[in-house]
Amino acid sequence: MDFQEFLDHKTVAIVGGVIGALAMIAFLTIVSALRHKITFVSWTRADGLQIRTNDVVMWSKLKNKTDQIDTDTKKSNRKGTTAMMILDPDKYDMSAESMLVIRDVNQPLVYASYENHHTRELLADGVDAYINDKLSDVLEVTRFWQKHFPELTDRKAEGYTSLWVKKILIPNLRRSCNAKIAFYKTMAKRDDVGKTLKDEIKRCIAKNEEYLDCIKELDASRILSPFEQEKLS
């Protein structure tokens, strides 16, 4: 090997060493920046360098929490709905027929509670369309029973539906949205949550704030009838 070949080999070795050092510095910089988010680091000849972050774990935690909030909301809506009575059972000596009416009238509202699509329906269709949709379900039942119970007027059905919206639905929906927003904001502040997930969290916060605006509009949508005022007092 002559002197020129020696220099060439030396240059390659130096350049290779510099590149290796720079790659190591870059790797350490990435690891340092993601130290709260990295859950696994591995290097093998077959697979090369593997770095895994905890975004999947954090997303699962976020999803589990919001699912639990939704479950609690559905349960509260269901329990509140089944406790409502469009007829006073004492007036009819708790007759099987009067209890059947109460169950039938509540049934479509119970179904709506289980489905738990209120905020999406409000956002997509608007307040009036949402109320009219629920009212039509209640009216279908009350009109069937009006021959036996003349007091089940359309006006009373409207008041009953509005009462359900104001007394049961709105408080539970508002509580749900606020609980989700509070949880999202807590997650957004964590160092171990990646940027992609934080961007999704910001979108979820904005969505729930939009839902709260719809709920506010729903709350101001109709004046309570005397029937509703009596039930709310």
Image (cartoon, rainbow, N blue to C red):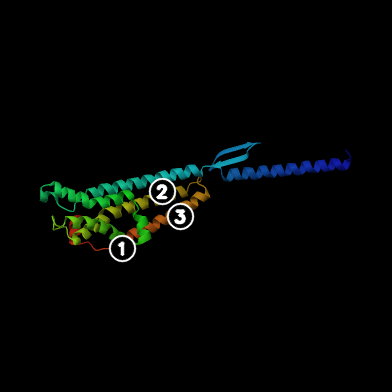
Residue under the point 48% across and 42% down = 57
Q: Earlier along the polypeptide chain: callout 3 or callout 1?
A: 1
Depth check, mark 3 against mark 1: the one in front is 1
CA distance for labels 3 and 1: 26 Å
Residue 106, x across and y down, in percent: 23, 51
Which residue corresponds to the image point at 27% horizontal and 52% vertical from the top-left? 109
| Residue picked out by circle 1 | 128
Q: Give the distance between the C-alpha atoms of the residues marked 2 and 1, in whole angstroms.
A: 31 Å
Which quadrant would residue 119 be assigned to in this image? bottom left
Which residue matches tag 3?
A: 203
* Residue nearer the viewer, 70 or 158: 158
Q: Residue at x 22, y 58 (%)?
A: 139
Say which amino acid is labelled 1: Asp
Q: Nearer the viewer, mark 2 or mark 3?
A: 3
Residue 213 in view, yes or no:
no
Residue type, mark 2 in image: Phe
- Residue that carries the numbered disc 2 in the rendered image: 183
Q: Position of residue 178 (x, y in %)?
A: 37, 52
Q: SS at mark 2?
A: helix
